[in-house]
Amino acid sequence: MMAQTNPTESRRATRAPRRSVIVLGVGVLALTFLVYKSTYNRAATLWTAVILVAVPLAAWALTAAGDRRRRQRRPGPLDEARRSLDVERVRTARTEHGESAGITEIRRQVPTLTYEQAVELHRYV
């Protein structure tokens, strides 16, 4: 099942990183220019620019890796619903009245699930 996204939110989500990159880029250029003007040393200027780019990139990479690990550890809504489900009642409803009764029983026990999620959960019960 695909999550519904708001087009305005997705545009904002892509605009924010662009702004950050532009602001950081302007800052790096300004500091690099100031270093060059104060030292007239190309090697020092180059190393300054490398450090000014590498540090934010490393911070971003570590943050992204941490976010990815947290997302992978977090259980989804179906996992939480599966744990809270009375499986015997679902199986009884399904054997006595058919599959739709089993799905209805799942939705009765966990009303926050959508119909598609209840059908998905019903397959594994």
Image: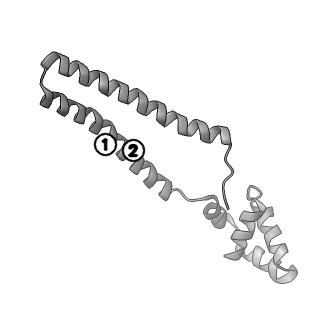
When asked about the image quadrant of residue 46, the answer is top left
- Residue 116 in the image: state x and y as whole percent: 75, 64
Determine whether 79 is above or below 63 in the image: below
Q: Is residue 48 visible?
A: yes
Q: Is residue 125 visible?
A: no
Question: Local crowd at mark 2 within 10 Å, few (<14), some, or many (≥20)?
Answer: few
Nearer the observer, 27 or 1: 27
SS class, disc 2:
helix
Question: Local crowd at mark 1 within 10 Å, few (<14), some, or many (≥20)?
Answer: few
Using the image, tell me which numbered label, if any, was put on residue 95.
none
Q: Badge 1 is on which residue?
A: 58
Residue at the image point whose x is 36% and y is 30% from the top: 25
Q: Badge 2 is on which residue?
A: 63
User: Which amino acid type corresponds to the residue marked 2 in the rendered image?
Assistant: Thr
SS class, disc 1:
helix
Q: Is residue 53 left or right of residue 47?
A: right
Determine whether 91 is above or below 32 in the image: below
User: Which amino acid type corresponds to the residue marked 1 in the rendered image?
Assistant: Ala
Determine whether 9 is above or below 107 in the image: above
Nearer the observer, 47 or 102: 47
Residue at the image point whose x is 23% and y is 35% from the top: 51
- Residue 42 in the image: state x and y as whole percent: 14, 28
Residue at the image point whose x is 74% and y is 60% from the top: 110
Determine whether 25 is above or below 36 in the image: below
Q: Is residue 89 left or right of residue 37?
A: right
- Residue 1 in the image: state x and y as whole percent: 67, 62
Distance from the alpha carbon under mark 1 to that under mark 2 = 9 Å
